[in-house]
Image (tube, helix red, strand yellow):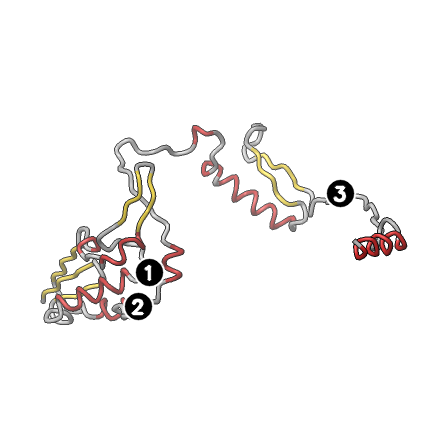
Amino acid sequence: MPEEATGKENLSKRGKDPMPRPELKEEALVAVQLVEELLTVELIPGDPDKITKIGSKMKEDVREQVINCLRKNKDMFAWTPQDLEGIDPGGKWRMCIDFRDLNKACPKDYYPLPRIDQLVDSTSGCKLLSMMDASQGYHQIMLAPKDHKRVSFITSDGTFCYIAMLFGLKNAGATYQRLVDKIFQPQLGRNMEVYMDDMLVKSK
């Protein structure tokens, strides 16, 4: 109790507010002005619904060139929602997964890819070239079981994961190139060239 009484006494001597407070000053808000005035341009003269905005500080000759370019390409603008392309009724849905964070965490595989100029030069003198594209080639390389969780994804029906390699992973290209180089090693440079899943058989 004596300590508590002493504390109250010391506090009363300093006043109700022992800690000094900074004086608050009210500052008036300043309205932000536009960088420059925008000019309204009718891309189709007489049609006020099809307009665009362009900066007024642009040089006059440059502005005229920009306006002429926009007017020549006015059909590229989507003026109404109906102008936007819809989903092709005959098309197929394609699942897309964002692996950017996973790719940042993966060390890079520096296995070299063939040089395009060397592949082109190797076809010199060949009379017949047969080009082939491996169908679902990436999906024929199985992932290590411990890596399945790293390529998992969430859907409205649950969480799933890939068990085979897929396009979009950081080292997918290098992994596939290493495989085809090993498979076709006797033919490479002689009667065949391979760039990942694109294959070329050449004949003289």
Left or right of 191, for residue 14: right
Kind of residue at badge 1: Lys
Please determine whether, in this image, residue 138 is positioned above or below residue 39: below
Element type at mark 3? loop
Badge 2 density bin: few <14, some 14–19, many ≥20, Cα 10 Å:
few
Query: Mark 2 and mark 1 in contact (Cβ < 8 Å)?
Result: yes
Mark 3 and mark 1 lie on one chain; the one further toward the N terminus is 3
Q: Which of marks 3 and 1 is in front?
A: 1
Element type at mark 1? loop
Tag on residue 31? 3
Mark 3 and mark 2 lie on one chain; the one further toward the N terminus is 3
Q: Distance between the residues labelled 3 and 2?
A: 54 Å
Kind of residue at badge 3: Ala
Tag on residue 170? 1
Name the residue located 57 percent from the left edge and 34 percent from the top edge.
51
Badge 3 density bin: few <14, some 14–19, many ≥20, Cα 10 Å:
few
Residue with the mark numbered 2: 109
Left or right of 87, for residue 144: left
